[in-house]
Amino acid sequence: MHSEYPPTLPAEYADIEFENNAQRLPLVLCLDTSSSMAGAPIQTLNDALADWTRELHDDVSLSYSVEVAVITFGGRGVGAWRGPQLLDPRTPMSPFVPAHAFQAPRFTASGVTLMTEALELAMQVVAARKAELRASGLQYYRPQICLVTDGLPTDGTGHMTDSWHRLLPVLAEEQQARRFRLYAIGVGGITDRGEQVLQAFAPKFNARIQGFPFRELLQMMSASANAEQKGAGDEVFEKIFSQFKTQRPAWES
């Protein structure tokens, strides 16, 4: 008899994946944890992520459809997290965790800003997860990737680099084909040049925000996920995002 369990799925997913036939919504948080985030910013991010995790667990409409993966860039390079566990890059395990089972990692800030490589990994894990869902006969909503940074892309030695230009045609094509929606958020003291990079990555959904409003940012992602589930048109996402940018959250209006 043919098994319905594709061999690519981690074993610990099996009890969750096949009991829950809700349409999935993959969500990737692509987070800057480089040395410029040290101190209050990384603490604020950790606290916001812990609060958001509890809110996700309590949100019936999101907790069984949203799947969360975390990509970080900083420290020893680019890392994929499966909940609180930093994955070994040699292990082909999906970083996506159902929202109702997601546990927030805790980050420390160090290292350089490998933003380009982090976005490339985010696109790879989204494509792999969609393939897994299709193989399992499960449907999915358009995935969301949320890039958050306070700096400029660097190479592995910490020097600024223009290698991010290689992403632009890929990102344009992927978003035109509706393969995912990318949000690019500059926080803290991000420079004009840093903002220009984010505008190039995500022409419609980029923002330069004063301070580190991670709680509001994560709530905006939840609001966007809710809109995705309801089949909202682009204008709804643009409204949610513009209200986040002006610090008047759409989900409170």
Image: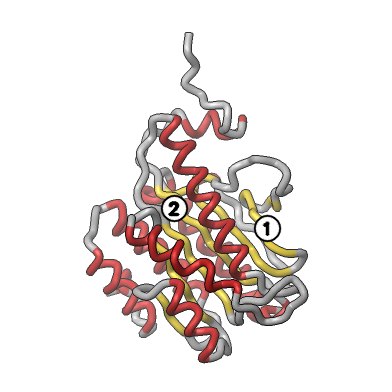
Image coordinates of residue 124 in percent, x first then y, are 54, 51
Return the residue at label 1.
Answer: 79
- Under circle 2, the secondary element is helix
Amino acid of disc 1: Gly
- Quarter of the C terminus within the rendering: bottom left
Image coordinates of residue 65 in percent, x first then y, are 40, 45
- Name the residue located 68 percent from the left edge and 61 percent from the top edge: 78
- Name the residue located 25 percent from the left edge and 65 percent from the top edge: 234
Nearer to the camera, 99 or 180? 180
Amino acid of disc 2: Asp
Nearer to the camera, 211 or 234? 234
Q: Residues within 10 Å of mark 2 (few under 14, many from 20)?
A: few
227 shown above or below 214: above
Image coordinates of residue 152 in percent, x first then y, are 60, 81
* Residue 24 lies in quadrant: top left
Colour setting:
secondary structure
Instruction: From the viewer's perspective, tell me whether residue 185 is left or right of residue 175.
Output: right
- Under circle 1, the secondary element is strand
Nearer to the camera, 112 or 24? 112
Please identify, in this view, whether the residue under mark 2 or under mark 1 is nearer the observer. Answer: 1
> How far apart, in angstroms, are the residues tagged by discs 2 and 1?
28 Å
- Name the residue located 60 percent from the left edge and 78 percent from the top edge: 162
- Name the residue located 54 percent from the left edge and 29 percent from the top edge: 14
63 shown above or below 150: above
Q: Residues within 10 Å of mark 1 (few under 14, many from 20)?
A: many
Return the residue at label 2.
Answer: 58
Mark 2 and mark 1 lie on one chain; the one further toward the N terminus is 2
Identity of the residue furthest to the top in this view: 1
Image coordinates of residue 36 in percent, x first then y, are 69, 82
Instruction: From the viewer's perspective, tell me whether residue 131 is left or right of residue 236.
Output: right
